Amino acid sequence: MFYGWRVVAACFVIAAFAWALGLFGGSVYLQAVTAAHGWAVAEVASAITLFFLVSASVQRLVGRSIDRWGPRPVLLLGALCMTTGVALIGQVTAAWQLYPCFVLIGIGWSTLSTTGITATVAPWFERHQGRSMTLAIMGASVGAIAGVPLLLFALARLGLGQGLAAVAVVSAALLLPLIGAVLRFRGPADLGLGRDGEAPPADAARSGAAAAVAHRRPRLLLWSAAAGFALALTVQIGFITHHVALAEPLLGMAGAGLLVSATGMTAFVGRLVLARIVDKVDVRGLAALVMAIQTAALLAVALWPTVPVLVVASLVYGYGIGHVTTLGPVVVRREFGAAAFGATYGAAATVIQLTSAFGPALLGFLRDGFGGYGPGLAIASVITAGASLALLAGRHWGRQ
């Protein structure tokens, strides 16, 4: 078996832990810390916000570091930072002590999430570039489905301090040997192979020249992708955060929970479908199409807030989540090549993460300002439509 698929499998596991302890773990930490210490929700939430801001600010550094030194030292550092931060959350005695904990988690998240994983996989594949990235990031779905229940189980059985310490120790014991053993090569050239396990190119100079041409493509092409995915993910993260509150008046709390779970499953299905088709389609055009469908789903809920419309629109929107969260790095890899992919996508990821971090606050502000979710979802649909248009405009610029 081509060694690159071992790298993909390792990154799948890394993604599962990263999303469980990072993105989805935030809601568990918020509830557990406030319940244990009686601190204000806003105070704890501000520390969690710092986690996202730290991660966004070092994305390009992470990409450049992987390009220069390979993935193993960067991801080992990230795993140590994330697991240490998680363990320390359970030991804090004052609210201010949460901030250094979430700085560590933010550093870990930046290295173990999309930028780190895709920069690790990118050098290994050409023909299967999209499928390999999609399968690696699919570990995020496992983290979403299993991570929160397992965290809650550990805290319920062991308490905040011992529970988070146990989670951190188990995670480090699995991640550190995995990263150290599997990610010891920077790419197929270290094994005397070409990408996808094929023979090395006969004309290395020509191959290098082609990579250089791809890397010099118009910067507007890159920033149109960054703008499109930043806008779409701003709405998407806001929708995910407010989904329970949006559905509860129509479905009740139990029904809202079931709908959120079903939406997560359609996102997983979306990733499975994407893995089969991604290397055969125009990925920028596919992303624009999915965003257009998400626009229609948001607008439907805004105009017709009934149970059938909410359920169908949520499932349709969730299917798109599986595409939009994955296609960003695939678009950049397809259009700019593997040369300096880490630095190239890292620059785009900085814009995407800094912008999308405000999604929950934006939708909350619109909801409070209009006294309901309808107008806010209508505005969100316009933003998502703008994201789709930004991707299509960028494709036009790339052909000039």
Image: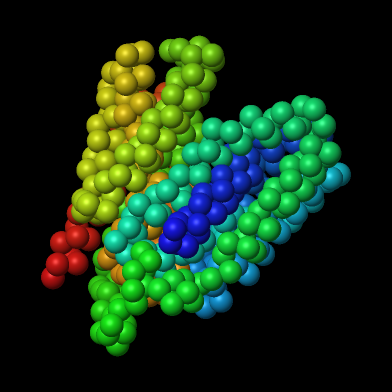
Q: Is residue 208 above or below residue 334?
A: below
Q: Residue at x 49, y 14 (%)?
A: 255
Q: Residue at x 61, y 36 (%)?
A: 147
Tell whether 4 sits left or right of 181. left
Number of callouts in the render?
A: 0
Residue 346 appears in which quarter of the rendering? bottom left
- Toward the viewer: 232 or 84? 84
Q: How is the image coloured?
A: rainbow
Residue under the image location 50 percent in, 44 percent down: 139
Query: Which of 170/286 is in front?
Result: 170
List x then y, in percent, for residue 14: 57, 51
Could one spot residue 365 in this view of the protein? no
Pinpoint residue 320: horizontal percent, then vertical percent.
33, 38
Which residue appears farthest toward the bottom when viewing the image? 205
- The quadrant the C terminus occupies is bottom left
Residue 296 percent location from the top left of the image:
25, 32
Left or right: 98, with 19 as reference point: right
Quadrant location, the N terminus: bottom left
Please provide percent x and percent y for residue 398: 19, 67
Q: Is residue 396 visible?
A: yes
Q: Nearer the viewer, residue 303 or 237?
A: 237
The residue furthest front is: 1
Q: Quadrant of residue 24?
A: top right
Is 281 on the left-hand or right-hand side of 357? left
In the rendered image, the vertical position of residue 250 relative to residue 268, given as above or below: above
| Residue at x 53%, y 38% (from the top left corner) | 142
